Every structure is written in structure tokens, then in C-alpha cells.
Image (spheres, rainbow, N blue to C red):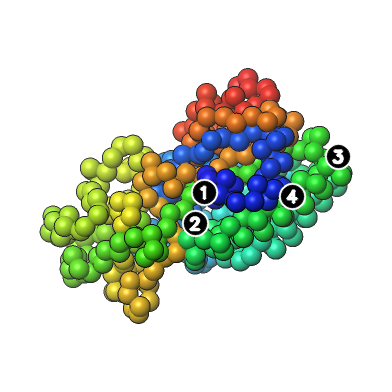
Amino acid sequence: FRWDYVEQQKDKEALPGFRILHKEGVRAKWVNPIFPSLSYASWTTLSTGLYAENHNIIGNYFHDSYRKETFELFNRTLTSNQRWWQDAEPIWTTATRRGRKVGTFLWARSDIPVQGILPHQAQGFQLTKGAGILGTNLEKTIKMLQSEDYDLVMVYNEHIDNKGHQFGPTSPELMLAVQEVDAELHKFLKKLEETNLDETVNVMIVSDHGMTSGTPQSKAEYVEIDDYLNMDDVSYVIDRAAVAAVAPLPGKADKVYKQLKHMRGIDVYRRDDIPEEYHYKNGRYVQEILVCAKPGFIISGADSSKQIPRDPSSPRPMIWGGLHGYDDKHPDMRTIFMAKGPSFKKHFKGEPIHLVDIYQIYAHILGFEPQPHNGSWSRVRSYLTNSAS
């Protein structure tokens, strides 16, 4: 959910749900994402408050070179490997261990035990299209809060992200998707009022990243990695579009680096030279070479079995309506934070915060100390009615 989607709506009376949050709650000007601004890495940051190099879910696709195992976005068998998830304790694990009753709907891999602990009700991520599933899960959330004594319910929906990838972040289809999600949000907020739950329940709306355009009309330029890289010199190439990782064969790192340095519109780093400000280079699964597209450029993955994931061989390049994963300072990667409830001020718009900051707010509201994290309390305390921490 890009930071400016609400303001993009031409009809100022549209989005009654988000308007309620703006009027009766708090919102940040925007939220600065992490690097890479990709879904699985960002979901894990939202749930732990850690940068990618600390929680080790460094993207949507990555590879453990030692164990010869791969993590792939839509492969539930591969992402279900418990070993990926033991480096950081998510909020649902801490809350459950502290005696809170927690439920999740489609939230990352909240269905995978961490330290042997699962939430009371856990549904992990799976590809689920449309806004209707959001409405269904929010209806279940009302029941869980009203009669089942849940302390924390986390609901994820990818409808807006899907339409952004397909049609682009400024498309009519994207704007309609925002309206469809808002309709479900509005029904939920009104139901909270009708049941008087709004007096005790805090609602937080967060997102993982923004979106930028990949269409020819936006003048996005696709750069074929095959035009520069000899695939005989590498074990594999992981991901594409905004950012890719390359694993050279033994003794080939210098050669591969020199090949990739010639890519137009691309920054190429050896692992030790990855900027510290990315908070990425020390991750366990970071490869020897990182390839980062500059804004306006898109990496077209290799037409090879060594490419993970492998895009269709035809047409080439595969065109993205919208995409993300760029440098976290790219304005289009910014996302949102909105909230409403007794723990938050009313009609307050605050300064930008960082994605790593949001986790500690959950712990504050739930009444326990957060796990060690990378967030800053000073950036979020102004949003809260009781900011002592």
C-alpha cells in the first residue's frame, strides 16, 4: 500500500474507512521501508522489528548455500521449513508465551512454530486474491474479539498488491482495489462501533512496502541480465526485477562481478561492499554479488534453469505493471501507518516512521516488553496517548 494511495483518489468522499482513521485516529506522513522492500522480508520486519540481516528472511527468494535449500515465495512446502523461522521471535510468539490469546489470518508464516509455540489460531500466507477474503476474515475477527477473548488478531490481504503488480500503481484498476479494500475496512470499523468494541479495541493499518511503475508508458527500462552474464560462471541467480543475488562458481567471483558492472542502470556490489545503511550484508543467506536496479530500471531475469524463479521464455522481457524491492530511500517504496483506538491520539498526523518501529507498538499496547529490535521509540511515542516506555 503505497503511502499516497489515499490522496490519489480523485473523489474526496471516497474511502470512508480510511477517512474515519484520518479523522478519529493517527497516521504517519509515510513509513520508510526496509531494504529490500520485498514482501517476505518486510512482513518479518513488521512482526519482529528487525532488519533483514537480523531476522534472516532476506527476500521473497533466497538460498542456503550450505544446506542447498531454497526459499521461494509461493512454495508453501519450502517456506514451511521451520529452520528458516527460528532466528527471530515474532510478536505472535511472544504474545502467546506471555499468555495472550492470538489469532492470525494469512499472516506470513505465523502457522510455523517458533521455539515450539504457535498462536491459538494460525493461518499462514497463501496466494488469496480479491478483497472478499478480507471481509470474511474481518467478520471472524469481530467474533473473536467480542466473544472469544482474543487479545491480538492480525489480518493480511494482498488485493491491492496484486492489482499494483498487474496494472501499475496509478492505474484505475489499482484505485478500484483501494476502494474495495476500504469498503471492507469501513464495514469493520462500523461494526466495532455498533458492538462498542471501538471503546476497547485498537486498530492498526500497516503495510510492507510501496510500488513503482514498470510499464512502457512510464518509460521503465528493462535490462536483460543474459546480455551481460555468462551463466556458465554461476551456480544460480536469485530473483530479478528490482534486486537480484548472484552466486558465482568457485573462482569466478571477480569475472562475474566485472561482467555485471557493465549493466546499464544497475548498481552491483560484492558482499563486503554492500552499503551498511541497507542493514542487509550480514544476513546469513546473502550471496557474493548483489545486483540492484536504480529507479526506472528493471532487471530481466536469466532465461536459464539457474534462475530462481524462472520467468516464461516468451515474451521477453516479462513486463511488470508495478513492482517493488528498490532502495528503501526511493519515495515510491514508502508505505503507510494508520491507527485508531484508546491507545492512540485523535486526528493526529505525525512525522515519518520506519518499518522497524511498528513492532514495539504492538508490545506496548499488549503490555509487555518487546524482544530486542531495531526500532526507535522516539519516532513513535508521539502517536500514543500513554507513551511511557
Residue 371 percent location from the top left of the image: 54, 33
Q: Do labels 2 and 1 touch, CB within 8 Å?
A: yes
Whole-Å distance between the Cαs marked 3 and 2?
36 Å
Measure the C-alpha gap from mark 3 to mark 4. 15 Å
Q: Quadrant of the C terminus?
A: top right
Say left or right for 251 vs 308: left
- Residue that label 2 marks: 169
Q: Position of residue 79 (x, y in %)?
A: 49, 61
Q: Which residue is mark 3?
A: 196
Callout 2 secondary element: loop
Quarter residue 136 falls in: bottom right
- As helix, strand or loop, the secondary structure at mark 4 comes to helix
Q: How many marks?
A: 4
Q: Which residue is mark 4?
A: 186
160 with respect to 145 (left or right) = left
Q: Can residue 208 be seen? A: no
Depth order, front residue of 173/301: 173
Q: Which of the 4 quarters of the picture holds residue 280?
A: top left
Q: Which residue is mark 1?
A: 2
> Along the polypeptide, which appears first: circle 4 or circle 1?
1
Whether residue 182 appears in this view of the structure is yes
Q: Residues within 10 Å of mark 1 (few under 14, many from 20)?
A: many
Q: Nearer the viewer, mark 3 or mark 2?
A: 2
Disc 1 residue type? Arg
Secondary structure category for the residue under label 3: loop
Q: CA distance from mark 1 to mark 3?
A: 31 Å
Q: CA distance from mark 4 to mark 2?
A: 22 Å
Residue type highlighted by circle 2? Pro
- Image point (59%, 24%), residue name: 382
* CA distance for labels 4 and 1: 19 Å
Q: Amino acid at mark 3?
A: Asn
